C-alpha cells in the first residue's frame, strides 16, 4: 500500500506547485498577465503553497513528508535566487 509518511512523497508534492504555476504563467498566459512584470511572483506563490503544505503535514506529524517538502522548497528557493535574481 501507499505510505503517506515518506520523503519521496514530500518531494513529489512540493514539486507540483512550481510546475503547475510555471505551466499556467509561461505556457498558457504567455507573459500577457500583469503579474508577469515581476518575474519571480509565480515562484513565490508556489513557495507559499509549499509552506502551507509543510505546515499541514507537520501538524499531522508526518515528519518524513514534511522533510521532503522542506528540502524541495529550499532547493526551489535557491534555484530562483540563482537564475531569476542573478
Image: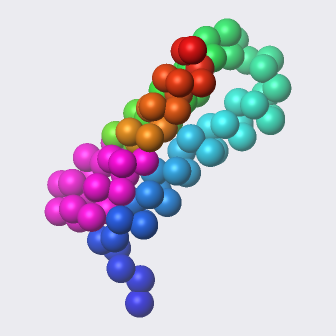
- Look at the image and name its color scheme: rainbow
Q: Residue at x 42, y 67 (%)?
A: 8
Q: Residue at x 66, y 37 (%)?
A: 22
Q: Does residue 64 sit above or below 17 in this rendering?
A: below
Apparent side of residue 45 relative to residue 64 in the rendered image (left or right) = right
Q: Does residue 39 sit above or below 80 in this rendering?
A: above
Residue 65 makes an appearance in the image? yes
6 magenta-colored: no
Task: Give whichever of 82, 5 is nearer the camera.
Answer: 82
Apparent side of residue 25 relative to residue 84 in the rendered image (left or right) = right
Q: Residue at x 52, y 32 (%)?
A: 79
Residue 16 % position (x, y) = 55, 51
Q: Quadrant of the N terminus?
A: bottom left
Question: In the figure, residue 65 lies in which quadrant?
Answer: bottom left
Q: Residue furthest bottom?
A: 1
Task: Give whichever of 25, 63 is nearer the camera.
Answer: 63
Task: Give whichever of 34, 54 is nearer the camera.
Answer: 54
Residue 82 % position (x, y) = 53, 24
Q: Which residues are magenta?
A: 52-72
Residue 34 % position (x, y) = 69, 12
Amino acid at each position: 500500500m501507499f505510505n503517506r509518511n515518506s520523503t519521496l512523497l514530500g518531494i513529489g508534492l512540493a514539486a507540483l506547485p512550481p510546475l503547475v504555476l510555471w505551466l499556467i504563467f509561461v505556457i498558457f498566459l504567455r507573459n500577457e498577465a500583469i503579474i508577469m512584470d515581476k518575474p519571480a511572483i509565480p515562484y513565490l506563490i508556489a513557495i507559499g503553497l509549499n509552506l502551507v503544505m509543510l505546515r499541514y503535514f507537520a501538524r499531522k506529524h508526518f515528519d518524513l513528508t514534511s522533510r521532503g517538502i522542506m528540502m524541495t522548497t529550499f532547493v526551489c528557493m535557491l534555484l530562483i535566487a540563482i537564475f531569476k535574481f542573478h
